[in-house]
Image (tube, rainbow, N blue to C red):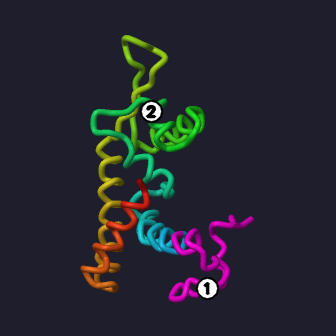
Amino acid sequence: MTSVNDFPGSADPASGQGFHGDHIAGLLGLALRRLRLEILVDSEARFPGLRISHYRLLEMIPAEGGRITDLAEAAGMTKQGLGQHVDYLQDLGFTESDRLAEDRRVRLVRRTGKGDEAVAFSRAAIGRLEADWAAQLGPQRYDEFRRTLAELGV
């Protein structure tokens, strides 16, 4: 079975018309799809088993580690759902976790060196796409695009 997120549709990315529609959600979806593809193009060879959601979670983990509860809230997930992602990443060697000595209910998650490598990999892919977009739009238009997105995201 194919996910609706994987359905290619018949969109014309240049016009934003077609299956994805011409509303802002469709246009942003096309941009995100391009970003996901850029990250995943070499991902399986370098980091087998990682999906976009895993890269996102790895990037969210602070250098000093993060509590499952805090990470789940930031990700908009349940503690149980986020915990399953962390367990999966831990099984693959991208994260490690410990219970806090002062409160055994609290689970602290940290990236491993391998997790740091995966974050660097995804950031490099994002950087490549940003450079492509800046070249396509020109530096001034791309800077305005970024400022506009930042303003709308607040």
Q: Which residues are magenta?
A: 1-28
Residue sitting at x 36%, y 61%: 150
> Which amino acid does the dot numbered 1 rest on?
Gln
Most extreme residue toward the left is 139
Is tag 1's residue or tag 2's residue first in the polypeptide sequence? 1
x, y percent for residue 132 = 32, 80
Choose between 74 and 129: the one closer to the eye.
74
Q: Main secondary structure of the magenta part?
A: loop
- The answer to whether residue 8 is left or right of residue 54 is right
Above or below for 11 versus 52: below
Q: Which mark is residue 70?
A: 2
Residue sitting at x 45%, y 38%: 90
- The answer to whether residue 8 is left or right of residue 86 is right
Q: Which mark is residue 2?
A: none
Most extreme residue toward the top is 102
Most extreme residue toward the right is 1
**Whole-Å distance between the Cαs marked 1 and 2?**
39 Å
- Is residue 19 inside the magenta stretch? yes
x, y percent for residue 45 = 42, 64
> Which amino acid does the dot numbered 2 rest on?
Asp
Q: Which residue is mark 1?
A: 17
